[in-house]
Image (cartoon, coloured by chain):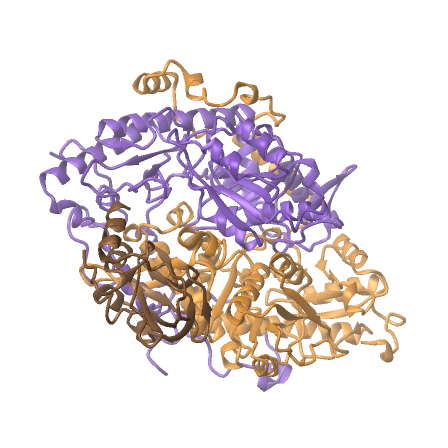
Amino acid sequence: MSDHVERFDVPGGAGGGRPPQRDFPLIFERGAPGRRAARPPLTEGAPLAELLGEDALRAAPPRLPEVAELDLVRHYTQLAHRQFSIDGNFYPLGSCTMKYNPKLHEDAAERFLDLHPYQDPDHAQGILELLHGLQHDLATITGMDAMSLQPAAGAHGELTGILMIRAYHEANGEGEQRRVVICPDGAHGTNPATASMAGYDVVEVPTGPDGEVDLAAFEAALGPHTAAVMLTNPNTLGIFETRILRMAEAAHAAGAQLYYDGANLNAVVGRARPGDMGFDVVHLNLHKTFTTPHGGGGPGTGPVGVKAHLAPYLPVPLVQRLGERFVLEGERPTSVGRMRSFYGNVGNLVRAYAYIRTLGAEGLRRVASMAVLNANYLRTRMKEAGFTVAYDRVNMHEFVAQPPAGLRTLDIAKALLDYGVHPMTVYFPLIVKEAMMVEPTETESLETLDAYAAVLADVVARAAADPAYLAGAPRHTPVRRLDETAAARKPILRYGFAER
Amino acid sequence: MNTPDHLRYTPSHEWATEPDDGVVTVGITDFAQDQLGDVVFVELPEVGRQLAAGEAAAVVESVKTASDIYAPVGGEVVEVNQALLDAPEAINTDAYGEGWLFRLRVADGAAGNARLDAAGYRAVAEEG
Amino acid sequence: MPYVPHSDEDVRRALATIGVEDLDALFADVPHEILDPPLDLAAPMDEVTLLAHLDALAAKDQQGVPTFLGGGVRRHFIPAVTPRLALQSEFVTAYTPYQPEVAQGVLQATFEFQTMMSELTGLPIANASLYDGASAVAEAALLAVRQTRREAVLVSRGAHPETREVLQTYLWPLGIDVEVVDLDPTLTTPVPTVGDHVAALIVQHPNHLGYLEAMPAMAAAAHAAGALAIAVVDPLSLAVLREPGRYGADIAVGDGQVLGVPMQFGGPAFGFMVVTEPLLRQLPGRLVGQTTDVDGRRAFVLTLQAREQHIRRGKAKSNICSNHQLAALLATVNMAALGPAGLREMAEGTVRRAHQLAAALRDDGGDMAENGRFFAEFVLRTRQDGATVRRRLAERGLRAGVPLPAEYGLGDGVILAATELITDADIAALAGALHDIGELGAGASRPAEEVGA
């Protein structure tokens, strides 16, 4: 049954057999007292007790690993082999935009490593020019008037944006009155969490049967208490909010500001701009649309863009151009303040800059077109494999599917692991039962998508033939299904050294 | 579905005893614990806290979700089930007994949301 | 077109499979009036052109010279093995480990990170990292507010000015007051009387000017009022300085750049937060825990996720959705490469070079506002303003001198730093350059009574 279906290597896997029973060692379980790898330059001098006072010093050293360099290398190399990655295989997580991270960007970033944020600005004109250029490019791409590169992640950008909206309403004397933020029920969890952190209450509006925000409910929810509306477009179902211009008008008429969550920009980058849709504030996820590395969970980067009326509230500092010089401008009396130290995740900002300069406008347009093409192609192939599509219509860069009757999303996800591919996002958005959110991105070839669909078909067929098959998956990964209940009930969050 | 007849229920899946010398015991139903999955942690209200009927009083956490528990009737928290802090699984294994959450001293005739009897609750739960 | 594999034939085949006429059909939902606007972006560059362009930009920046700058970022020794291991492509191009069976690499490395941060700080529970030190301080303050239900925090002026700005940004929307304790003439924080409206006392150690604070007394003062003691610490200093867990801190936070992350003009590095057991449920950010799989193998998994935004949504402890995993991994590998001995040697080198520099400047009449014990940094008062001093030193091939902020009331000056990478020749060069620009030598020093006035 499965002979024709291509199986890929499972990272750290057992090549079709059982994984070894033994525990993979922690770094603390390797090495021996007195061993070491790296040796820093040594400095002679007075003992620290003399320079700092005995009372300031710690009595016993921290229990860090003592390993020789080769053992260090083997440990972290073997650990890397136990890790799934984009470089390894297909990773179609919805709304994560797991596109290829170009190696060229690593070369680009290497040129700007040894820069201190407080070095003389006259001797940092190159990096400042780059950041200024990126501010301009991102503003152009999003159709906004000004950009801050400061936020460290999408959620951080969201907080920045909502705080700016709050400052705007306060400045207009409506801060007390406008206490509510509207989010669709399909919104990513960061949206209501951000609103709470900014001191707002959250009101949810429902998604209609067409997969778009219910316009009547939306308009009814708007009022003098509304501070902001947070939307993603296309939304978390991968569907473009076709009534966005009307929604923007309604929100503005009610005196509210419109916030764009840029998580799904890959669907329209280069082809449509949130600024043109009527949004007042935008955050971008450079680690999604602009392919800065996900790094196993971060660092991300979440620059935020605004229309002119909100520019006075941008966080400081911004990179400005004064004639031929670039400066970090920190004088902005109505700024919401600083969101973090220094200027932003510059290492990743350099990578995003390199990407935009490589693609240009035409390249970005192609990204969106092919992202949407690939998603619709995979949607079609998944339907052929027996999956239901929650809102079965032309979608954008992602879509939400459901498993065939009787099968659970969780079990299918675990079965996929044995084929060496990665499951899609599971159980999000919350408004679809047994949701499977799929985003292939534009950097995948059609053959990769075909292979994935074939794997899915095979999983379905095997599940039909053997009901116990799915429950026992995965079988060939380095570890199998985990006891997450025990992990939460009796948390063990650090290594237990033998008591000293 | 296990729904003892001697208890009162809310549509949000809490159960409450009839007042015994002015004190009502509150927990979550067997249906609710099944939906939540393995309970890993419980956040209980402070003793002495005044709760209004329908106010969020406690949080029951499983691995994949966290549910607010609402006071079925207004009153003052007089006791909480400390044993749950070490053994939250009691909610899964004995939702109506060892899995009780907290006790309230209720004012006479206090309005409450525990209007459903066992049959009424079963109907609500099956529908949703 | 780079990175996008589709040929015309691929596009034709895909459109046919989908059952639409052309690509436009796939964008039919986008209002035509906003579709395909012209974009004012530079023409695309090929690889060679791009790298030449970046080289030209980098040529305008001063890199690879002796560096005496601190203020939260320092240039330390990073062994070659550290980036080669941490930046393997499996770690770089992985996502958040939501499918733990194929993510034991990231999950175990994070568990190792949590353990190492716990060891450094002497507190039991570390999260998987936050964005940076400043936002970590803000998150710690919010934690204290949630835990104590009080509405103010007290922070020393010795905390980095940018940290205090970020603290304000995060706390203002929730109506939490931020009160500041000024430094005394010793350039350290006098132990304050903490009011019972205060959720936390926040003290940075070493402080922004470089000086060590009386941390045990600070913690005691906080606890006497029922407030939490938050220590903002330099993690490299903890290789030698007393751990926060040993002097009563409830929370230790700070920035991890000095543990093995390149400076990169200020980011990305990572923030860390380590707490006592009772604060576990309030801890923001990701946590990796140990468990077993169905066959009894030890394994690691994201845990206690019910605190986080994707479950708790509006009631989450924070909106934070990510951690700075790759930067934390650099630190993890680096700490394993150095071990306790190597980390101690780096800290010792840092302290000794900083003191050696201070002595050299003092010997040449330098006006040292030196009244306290310092770790890696100290204040030199100057005749010219700090930014001018820094620029003139840069012109002489040295990166030195963070301008002394006006809020400390010390007049003009610079904060100088040293690390184990500084050599005798570097120190001589800086002393010589400072002398040349008139900041040292006869006539440069000021009467003693002006210091700290």
Write down the colour of chain A: purple
x, y percent for residue A434: 28, 42
Does C20 sit left or right of C39 as displayed?
left
Which residue shows up at 26% across the image and 30% down it?
A: A382
Does C281 sit left or right of A327 as displayed?
left
x, y percent for residue C188: 70, 77
Does A90 sit left or right of A371 as displayed?
left
Q: Which of the 4 quarters of the picture holds residue C351?
A: bottom right
Q: Which of the 4 quarters of the picture holds residue A325?
A: top right
Write down the colour of chain C: orange
Taking depth in this image into account, of A74 and A257 the one nearest to the observer is A257
Considering every residue shown, the one lying at the far left of the view is: A465
Vertical arrangement, residue C429 with respect to residue C358, above or below: above
Taking depth in this image into account, of C424 and C279 the one nearest to the observer is C279
Considering every residue shown, the one lying at the far front of the view is: B109
Chain in brown on the image? B
x, y percent for residue A383: 26, 28
Which residue shows up at 73% across the image and 75% down it?
A: C183
Considering every residue shown, the one lying at the far top of the view is: C21
Number of numbered markers: 0
Taking depth in this image into account, of C272 and A358 the one nearest to the observer is C272
Which residue shows up at 57% across the image and 30% down it?
A: C49
Q: Which of the 4 quarters of the picture holds residue C231?
A: bottom right
